[in-house]
Image: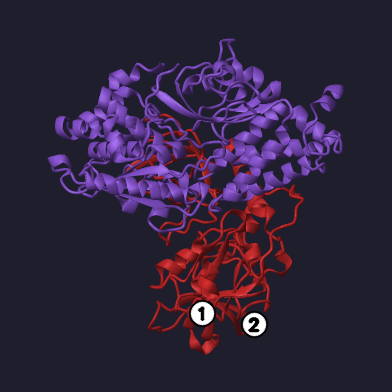
Amino acid sequence: MGRKILLEHIDKPGIDQIESYIKYGGYRSVSKALKEMTPDEVTEEVKKSGLRGRGGAGFATGLKWSFLDKSTDKPRYLLCNADESEPGTFKDRLLMEKIPHLLIEGMITSSYALGCNTSYIYIRGEYMFILRILQKAIAEAYAKGFLGKNILGSGFNLDLYVHPGAGAYICGEETALIESLEGKRGNPRIKPPFPAVSGLWNCPTIVNNVESIAAVVSIVNEGGDEYAKTGIGKSTGTKLISASGNINKPGVYEIEMGVPVEEFIYSDEYCGGIKNGLELKACVPGGSSVPILPKHHLLYESNGNPRLMSYESLSEGGFATGSMLGSGGFIVYDEKQCIVRNTWNFARFYHHESCGQCSPCREGTGWMERVLHNIEYGHGKMEDIDLLWDIQRKIEGNTICPLGDAAAWPVAAAIRHFRHEFEYHVKYRNRVFDEDHVYQPEMKAQLV
Amino acid sequence: MLKVTIDDISIEVPPGTTILQAARMIGQNVPPAMCYYSKLEGSGGKCRTCLVKVTKGSEKDPRPMPKLVASCRTGVMDGMEVRNETSPEVIDARKGVTEFLLINHPLDCPVCDQAGECKLQDLSYEHGLAKSRYEFKRREFEKRDIGDKIQLHMNRCILCYRCTQVADQLTPERVHGVLNRGEVSEISTYIEQAVDNDFSGNMIDVCPVGALTDKTFRFKSRVWFTKPMLAHRECTTCSGKVTLWFQGSEVLRVTTRKDKWNEAEAFICNDCRFEKKKTEDWTIDGPAHIDTHSVIAQNHLPFELPVVQKNLPDAL
């Protein structure tokens, strides 16, 4: 059984109430940080912990904090990115819904470290019910004196607000989030300048994922070095994985970094194997935007070692044979699932969510979606597969924000690893599905 | 001063200059810019046609930049080395962007008033494919009047955002912006209001394509049949320095004076643009310079006549 850091107390009754939360050791990090540590010492602990951003990019949190421009006398802001919209990812929801005080505690400690007196939690519009849970928790924290003026007599002031978005995927991109929070259209900004220099209202700003901020609590409590002992290599600590798809036990699991992928899928402690006794076909290990991997690449690295659930191991081999840990949206496909249909579904999502600001993403996502729709519904041509490859190549890396890459990678990986399925769709246009529109691998087996 | 090298040509530029501006200072191998407009704050970075490859970040940090960067929004660093037209990767990306810009463009150049001075035409001439690979229905919008003198034809729009920036930055009221998201986003006014201010006509001039057209000029003539003349008048609202486009002795339209990069030298007011269409309203300064590459120049004698024989009496 792996160590639980974030979800340790999730099953305790009344943990969403501040009294129970304090009973189980809550808000210790606030008093420890504010009374015993300087802000720089807190940042130093986060650096030592090796914590990497849990939102998807995996950028070192401590390093990001050290970029915050402290030379100006402008106010500084900490924003919590709770705009969890990546298909396949639902970990932050669980954290905020069940243990809202963990996030608030992390926000207080992190704000203290960064010297922010106003902080915001930007939550996606679909999580309106969680907004109310958070607001109630914030009110409790104010009543107990963990928020507001002169917190615990330390002289540190902090106001914490929750702001709902209107349900746009793009507002999870940090600069689009800032624009949206400023009350503007959620278009990503052109970088540089980065938010750490000029972010919210042109003031230095740090944007962190919910899980990263929640992890700061235990880093302060037990010390960065101690936290870094959990995990493997440069992937320290634990990670919440949202497991979904054709598995026996979908849900959110907290794993220690370094659990083998095979164990994660088949062990009863985690996903519990593939549903209905079918074979594993493929898996998207980090949310819809990371490349899909077929079984042999998923379970083994290119040198034959078992692949582990960590930032390094999952990205081993580059995109040719590897993928990314991303935000931890672990989507498993059994042998009956159709990769073309799945790729079309993802492409449809990115087409819908593109902000329309820069041309490759605005035009390219729609184009890919239509070509994939044609292939999926039996109107495709062989040239379309190469056309798709060409379109994704011209989107990737040429856009303002990473949404273009996120739209291009799944298509690229599907063609790279499952080109035969695309060709099958084109060749045998009417024979791919049964009446329930379920993909028929037996038919393919006859042909290969 | 910072030293920057673009396509093996070096130049020293003041700090704060972008790569595109530095290339314009050099004067050759200039990346095309569909959305960047030096007179408008915050413009650029959107169309991605000006992508360049930075092969050396700076003298201090010589690492190359991992992705292609938008030259209009990337500041130069000392010792930076940039590849524009000498990089196959850049040309390839530019071709891709051109194709993306064209897939939903109606290509109705034969009936478009912008034809002949359209930047998208130039771009597709240089970087476009001979044949479109897009086989789906192009997106369509209704034509709409924004103000009594300006028509918006969203089908042709490439969403460069220049016109919304004009509305934002030249005039006090913001009535004009982008609605919807992604592929179906469109330029619109707030609940279909008219854009009603003294400088609204400038959005026609900043539009790189034919999405915003002057209703007093629509379908009057092709631009290459008209002759541009610089002129000025005493105007209380603007500088009064304009270009008049003549057909015979008739003024068909009035626009701003454009510089070498097709940008307005000074924005003009609607009164000068739409109301003053008689020759006697203006003092003519002389013919406007038209680049010899432009189709408009085909109707004119080039300005600098080739000197056949310098010393004619001697030859005789």
On screen, residue B263 above or below B281: above
- Tell me, yes or no, if residue B283 can be seen here: no
Say the numbered circle drawn on residue A446.
none
What residue lies at 64% left-to-right and 42% top-to-bottom?
A347
Asked whether, in this view, residue B84 is left or right of residue A297, the answer is left
Q: Colour of chain A?
A: purple
Residue B311 at what x, y percent from top left? 55, 63
Rate crowding at label 1 as few (under 14), some (14 to 19) or many (20 or more) other CA atoms within 10 Å.
many
- Chain rendered red: B
Asked whether, in this view, residue A161 is left or right of residue A391, the answer is left
- N-terminal label among 1 and 2: 2
Give the chain letter at badge 1: B
Residue A314 at what x, y percent from top left? 53, 22
**What residue is shown with label 1?**
B273
Rate crowding at label 2 as few (under 14), some (14 to 19) or many (20 or more) other CA atoms within 10 Å.
few
- The picture quadrant where one finds residue B217 is bottom right
Could you tell me which quadrant the N terminus of chain A lies in?
top left
Mark 1: secondary structure: helix
Mark 2: secondary structure: loop
Residue B169 at what x, y percent from top left? 40, 67
Kind of residue at badge 1: Arg
Q: How many marks?
A: 2
What residue lies at 23% left-to-right and 47% top-to-bottom?
A143
Could you tell me which quadrant the C terminus of chain A lies in?
top right
On screen, residue A11 above or below B276: above
